[in-house]
Image (cartoon, rainbow, N blue to C red):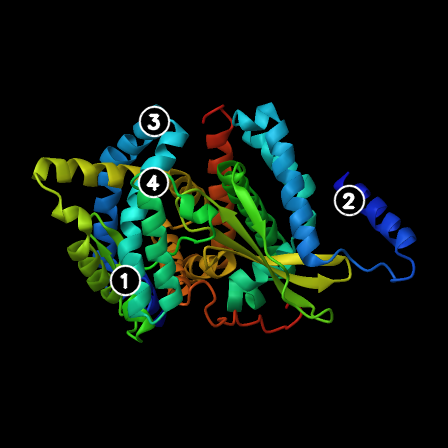
Amino acid sequence: MIAALVAGCAGTSERDPRDPFEALNRRIYRFNDVVDENVAKPVATGYKHVVPGEMRDRVRNFFGNIGDVFIGVNNFLQGKVGDGASDWARVLWNTSFGLLGIHDVASQMGFEKHDEDFGQTFGWWGASSGPYVVLPLLGSSTVRDGIGKGVDLYTDPLTEVRPYHVQYAIIGLRLTQTRADLLDASRILEEAALDKYVFQRDAYLQRRRSLIYDGSPPRERLEDSEDGKTR
Amino acid sequence: MARLARTLLLLLAAVCGAPAAAQPTPPDVLVKNVTLEVVDLIAKDKEIKAGNRAKLIDLIEAKVLPHFNFGSMTALAMGQGWNKANLEQKKRLTDEFKTLLVRTYASALAAYSEQKFDFRPLRAKPSDTDVTVQVRVLQPGAQPVPIDYSMEKTAAGWKVYDVMVGGVSLVANYRTEFNNAVRESGIDGLIQNLSKKNRSLEAGSTPAKK
């Protein structure tokens, strides 16, 4: 009787407190996966096959340069004035001597590229991540990062480009480049994970936490096994 | 074979390093040497570059494996579940997890072996027995990817017990998966899960595919 009750509960799979919408999230995840398998991945694979690596570096640099403008803004918003100034110096050097950003001359000059966005800024200000959510097409996120993503898209300079068909073509190229850069990582994920959904979720949450602390988050103790022998 | 080589190396170290009572290689030096050696071997090997996964895995088993402590890694990834496992189960878990990690590591190396590495100076006191060795993979037009090796000092030298890539701890990432599997189908279920995963990867990678 009790066993039956326990089994009944186990069937719905115990909820992870970070992921209260797991059932819905998994459905959106499966949908995204279908779109990825049938559209994004084949396009990105073809792109990587046809376009030489050096050319792809230039495309990545070009979009990276545009991205640096608001990476700088976010660093200023987080009070990291030095980093923000460095980001804007990158834009200056790369846009001029880097020929509209296709060469990343600033990195060679010692201005390192950063990774910032509005979700991280909200996190830096103290907003907790809220529940994990999977956004249609956009993938892994949290409530906080989803709102951040909205602001990122709203402030994205590429949305100013007119006429629209040019804008769509440019954004399409950026998406293709981004997906192509993730081909290896997604294959590794595929190989490494027992349950892809869980593996990707946990990696996303760890990664965002690390980014908010710029790579050195306060160490989370992996609690020792009780016999205390191993660690 | 690998063990023989290691024994010889240890002997050599013991003979040469007599005054320091066989001080083990410092962890940062170890990471740098092993990384550069493996990347160099991959670059020179046409078969591996052409996608011969089995050969790459052999290389990793010979060069990299001796520096990992898979017992610690498995115990950490299992968390509470580790204590519920008997000796036989612990051994099988460790073996299966090792196989999976080697395969994953091989894929990652194959993907990133042509990038430049930046080996960060070690920030630790000489007396520390648990350190983090930081390496960064530099890639054009993108933020460098940090790879942090958590290492512990053992009688047999420094051993890696966790790898963090871009802030994601491999061990921590497996913990939820392992816990879920144990909750749903017990420790033997997890072992079966892992071995099924390993066998399917083995089956999928034998034909020469890019």
- State the residue position of label 3: A51
Q: Are marks 1 and 3 on the same chain?
A: yes
Q: Are marks 4 and 3 on the same chain?
A: yes
Give the alpha-carbon distance from disc 1 to disc 2, as whole Å.
54 Å
Determine whether B209 is above or below A123 in the image. Answer: above
- State the residue position of label 4: A60
Q: Are marks 2 and 3 on the same chain?
A: no
- Pinpoint the chain carrying mark 4: A
**Residue B62, percent from left and from top:** 69, 40
Residue at screen point 70% across, 53% down: B29
Give the alpha-carbon distance from disc 4 to disc 3, as whole Å.
12 Å
Instruction: For marks 2 and 3, give the one nearer the viewer.
Output: 3
- State the residue position of label 2: B3
Three-letter amino acid code of the residue under disc 4: Arg
Instruction: For marks 1 and 3, give the one nearer the viewer.
Output: 1
Looking at the image, is mark 4 or mark 3 earlier in the sequence? 3
Location of the C terminus of chain B (image quadrant): top left
**Residue A24, percent from left and from top:** 20, 57
Q: Are marks 4 and 2 in contact (CB under 8 Å)?
A: no
The residue tagged with tag 3: helix, strand or loop? loop
Residue at screen point 59% across, 23% down: B46
Give the alpha-carbon distance from disc 4 to disc 1, as whole Å.
20 Å
**Residue B68 appears in the rendering:** yes
